[in-house]
Amino acid sequence: MDLPEGLPNFVMGMSRGGLMAIRLAQIRQDLFSGCILNVPWIDVHESAKPGLILNGVISVVNKMAENQVLVNQKIGKGRNKETSEVL
């Protein structure tokens, strides 16, 4: 594989390709500086998964927040106070 010398090289993947990108970066650490992943298809170890109660709380918060618009309340220098940045 011919890669440019002196520049960082990244492997990129989305969904199942994200999983493949992670594995490729693990196997060929000499080739890549890092990964760029978009919703990679990975799973969380069973010991790190939230319990039943926390899952219920997360579901309720998700339902309450699904139609909310997030607004950045920090106003930078030179900005009008009426201006807010929508995230």
Image (spheres, rainbow, N blue to C red):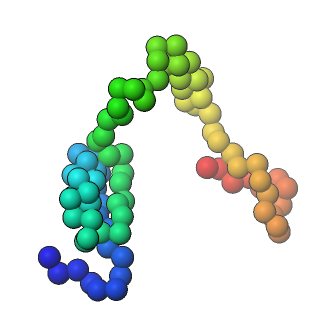
Q: Is residue 59 left or right of residue 9?
A: right
Q: Is residue 45 left or right of residue 24?
A: right
Say which of 83 and 29 sits in front: 29
Q: Quadrant of residue 46?
A: top left
Q: Is residue 28 left or right of residue 61?
A: left
Q: Is residue 1 left or right of residue 55?
A: left
What residue appears at the point 82 percent right and 53 percent down from the top-left corner?
A: 82
Res. 43 in view = yes
Q: Position of residue 83 (x, y in %)?
A: 77, 55
Q: Position of residue 54 (x, y in %)?
A: 53, 19
What residue appears at the point 25 percent right and 71 percent down from the top-left corner?
A: 31
As drawn, 1 above or below 24: below
Q: Position of residue 71 (x, y in %)?
A: 69, 45
Pick the quarter of the image with the N terminus. bottom left
What residue appears at the point 34 percent right and 60 percent down from the top-left corner?
A: 35
Q: Quadrant of residue 12?
A: bottom left
Say which of 52 and 13 sits in front: 52
Say which of 67 and 6 sits in front: 6
Res. 60 in view = no
Give the number of marks: 0
As drawn, 68 above or below 18: above
Q: Position of residue 38 (x, y in %)?
A: 36, 51
As drawn, 43 above or below 21: above
As drawn, 28 above or below 68: below
**Residue found at the very far left of the displayed protein:** 1
What residue appears at the point 46 percent right and 18 percent down from the top-left corner?
A: 51
